[in-house]
Image (cartoon, rainbow, N blue to C red):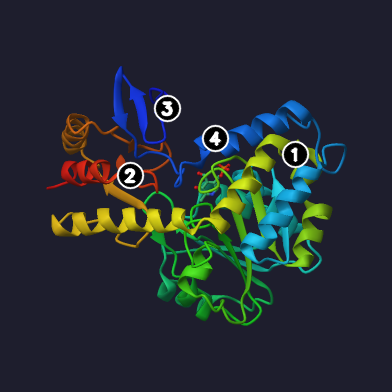
Amino acid sequence: MNLPPYIQPVDATHVRYRGRRLVYFGGCDYYRLARHPKLLKAHARASARDGLGTGASRMTTGNHPAHDALEAELKKFFGSATATVIGDGYLANIALGQALGSCSRPFDGLFIDEHAHVSLRDASQFIGCPTTTYRHCDAADLAKRLAKRKTTRRLLLVTDGVFGATGRIAPVAELARGLPRGATMWIDDAHGAGVLGARLRGTVEHVSPGGLGGCEVIQSTTLSKAFGSFGGAILGPAWLRKSLLEGSGIVTGSSSLPAGYATAAGIAAEMLRSRPGLAKRLRRNTEFVAAELRRVGRAFVDSGFPVVSLDCPERGSAMKLRRRLLAGGIYPSCIRYPSEKKGAFFRFAISSEHTRPQLESLARALEL
Ligand SMILES: Cc1ncc(COP(=O)(O)O)c(C=O)c1O
């Protein structure tokens, strides 16, 4: 299998593809902060001062004031007891798996959503305890499987907060209700963080603002989607930070996040906190597209998340939709993961920066 042809960004909402300037609904840069002049300038200034890379892990000589500053901002943003910055979101999950697998109170049962992100599936192998896969977002199936388990003293549930391919939001409150007291829920909020919830803290704030009862929550995320930069982070209780520093090979053996990205991510988080207009625009745009698709009878996961995903397993129908999108001046964002059996799907991510005419042209192209 070859890599797909490359696309060249032109501005916040356009790309150049095969010689044409097209409206872009790909990727996960929900506020288009990756091109924000303030962030680009901060990144360039920090890189000029501190270098492109740190050249070492945080546990050796790669610790930098920009990491501390970003962690302080993330603690404020998420309201978490601790924040630990890691090289990227995938690595953050691996680091978390390493830490949870080596902590002093080991887990003896792990339950994971069947569609969990590949990084979570990889990371769960570090936990070193029996693993059970439950049906996608299905709290009843989880309950059935929990009832069958042999005695579990310390239980870990692992799920994406938002499933990025479809925009489906995990029913975290229902899942938590079925768990024994004192269980831990690990939510990979790569998509939900910065997008969902009154303070943009992510899936739990959106689904269950009062928290998840007796369930301990650990959140991992990327800084490359809503935050427009690069990097990963883990938010959680104090014991977790200690376990990460003491038990993760990523923290000791992988180069730390470059200062430019750390600085830009911190500014992005501060911008999202202080400029509610950004999130308001994203919600308005999401609701507009959803209302248009409902009006024309197009079936989609109508979760309120800014992603529209359409399965297109047959080549003929995929080609037809591709032609319609191109005729409407839209980049045909078709995805096919080599490891997945379900075939191709089109995924459209709505951003706060798309204009009303751009959103209208997307809705028109998706009319049945
Ligand atoms: C749910 C989820 N987790 C983790 C990651 C990995 O994040 P990163 O791209 O920062 O490595 C992604 C990236 O697409 C993701 O969608």
Q: Which amino acid does label 2 sit on?
A: Phe
Which callout, 1 or 2, points at the residue further toward the start of the chain?
1
Which callout, 2 or 3, points at the residue further toward the start of the chain?
3
- Distance from label 2 to label 3 (Cα)? 16 Å
Specify whether 38 is left or right of 141. Answer: right
- Distance from label 1 to label 2 (Cα)? 32 Å
Asked whether disc 1 touches disc 2, contact meaning CB atoms under 8 Å apart, the reply is no
Specify whether 213 is left or right of 116. Answer: right
Residue 37 is labelled as 4
Q: Residues within 10 Å of mark 2 (few under 14, many from 20)?
A: many
Image position of 71 with respect to 199: above or below? above
Snapshot quadrant of residue 313: top left
Image position of 176 with respect to 59: above or below? below
Mark 1 or 4: the one toward you: 4
Residue at point 66%, 29% (across, down): 44
Residue at point 44%, 47% (across, down): 30
Residue 153 point in image, percent of width and height: 69, 77
Q: What residue type is labelled 1?
A: Ser
> To which residue does mark 1 refer?
256
Which callout, 1 or 4, points at the residue further toward the start of the chain?
4
> To which residue does mark 3 refer?
9
- Distance from label 1 to label 4 (Cα)? 24 Å
Q: How crowded is mark 4: few (under 14 residues within 10 Å), some or many (20 or more)?
A: few
Q: Which amino acid does label 3 sit on?
A: Pro
- Distance from label 1 to label 3 (Cα)? 27 Å
Residue at point 51%, 42% (across, down): 33
User: In the image shown, does 243 or 356 lie closer to the viewer?
Assistant: 356
> To which residue does mark 2 refer?
348
Residue 209 point in image, percent of width and height: 52, 75
Examine the rendering and report whether any part of residue 140 can be seen. Answer: yes
Q: Residues within 10 Å of mark 1 (few under 14, many from 20)?
A: many
